[in-house]
Amino acid sequence: MAEVKLAVWTIHNMSRKSGKKYSAAFKQVEAKPYTLEDAVPLVKKIKFAKFDETVELHMRLGVDPKHADQMVRGTVVLPNGLGKTKTVLVIASGDKLREATEAGADFVGGDDMVTKIQTENWTAYDAVIATPDMMRSVGKLGKVLGPRGLMPNPKTGTVTTDVANAVREVKAGKVEFRVDKTGVIHVPFGKVSFDQVKLVENATTLLNAVVKAKPAAAKGKYVKSVTVCSTMGPGVSLDVTPYNQKTV
C-alpha cells in the first residue's frame, strides 16, 4: 500500500512540475533557506492558480511518533483566522445544546447525531465538539471520525463542558497540528489573498506553538525542516535556526 501511495504521489508531482506555470514559479525559488518574512511574499508572488489557494506549513520534526512520549500534538487559535468559517458539529445534551446553538454551532444534537453519522457516514462538518457525558456514544464513531481527524479529544479542547467557548475558538480560526507517522506536521495558516503581515503573524503563532510543544523525550535537533507553500505552488524552505533556539 505504501508503495502504491508513493507512486501516486510521484506521478502527481511530476505532472505538476511538468506544467509551464508550475515550472515558472519553481524557477523563482532559490535553493536557499529563507526567513519567514521573505518566504511569505515569495509564496504570494509565485502563486498561479485562479482560486484563492490555502497557504500551508510543512514541518519535519526530530521525533519518533511511534513512542507516546514523543508525540507532538496541540491546537492554536490563529490571530487572523484561516480565511474560511468552519462548519461545527456539537454533540451534547441538556442545556449544552442551547449554549452550542447560541455560540454559532452549525449542527447540534445528541444521540440522534451519533446515529446519523453511523447510518449515513455523514461528515458534512469541519470540526466535532462533544461534552464528556456524550463520549460513550461518540466513541462508537471512531471508524468514521478517526481517519478524518475529527474525533473529539480532551487534548485539543474538543471534549469539554464549555462548548460555547470551544465553538467560538473553532469559528475564530483554531487549528490542530499533529505529527504524522513520518514525523511531519502539515497545517494550513491562511489564504494567499491575505495581507503579508497577517500571514506572517499566523505562521509565527503556529511555529511558536509547535516549538513549545517539543516533548521532553525529544533529543537532538527538534525542527529539521520547514517549508511554506500554497496549495498548487512549489515549496519555499525556511531557515530553521530560530526554531531550534527559542520561540520566534
Image (cartoon, rainbow, N blue to C red):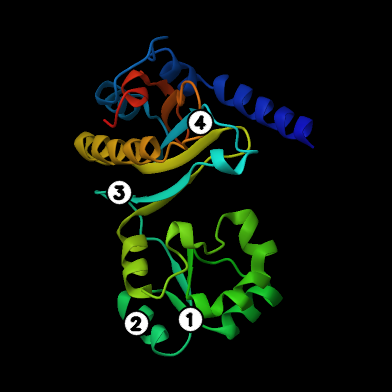
Looking at this rendering, what residue extends furthest in the top direction?
31
Q: In the displayed structure, does residue 39 sit left or right of residue 25?
A: left
Task: Tell which circle, 1 or 2, labels the residue nearer the N-terminal end.
Answer: 1
Q: Nearer the viewer, residue 138 or 23?
A: 138
Q: Which residue position holds label 1?
A: 92
**Residue placed at 60% from the left, 73% from the top?**
138
Question: Looking at the picture, which amino acid does disc 2 mark?
Answer: Glu
Task: Tell which circle, 2 or 3, labels the residue nearer the N-terminal end.
Answer: 3
Question: Within 10 angstroms of label 2, few (less than 14), some, or many (20 or more) residues?
Answer: some
Q: Which residue position holds label 2?
A: 99
**Residue placed at 43% from the left, 16% from the top?**
24
Q: Nearer the viewer, mark 4 or mark 1?
A: 4
Q: Nearer the viewer, mark 1 or mark 3?
A: 1
Question: Within 10 angstroms of label 4, few (less than 14), some, or many (20 or more) residues?
Answer: some
| Disc ID at residue 218 | 4
Q: Which residue position holds label 3?
A: 78
Callout 1 secondary element: loop
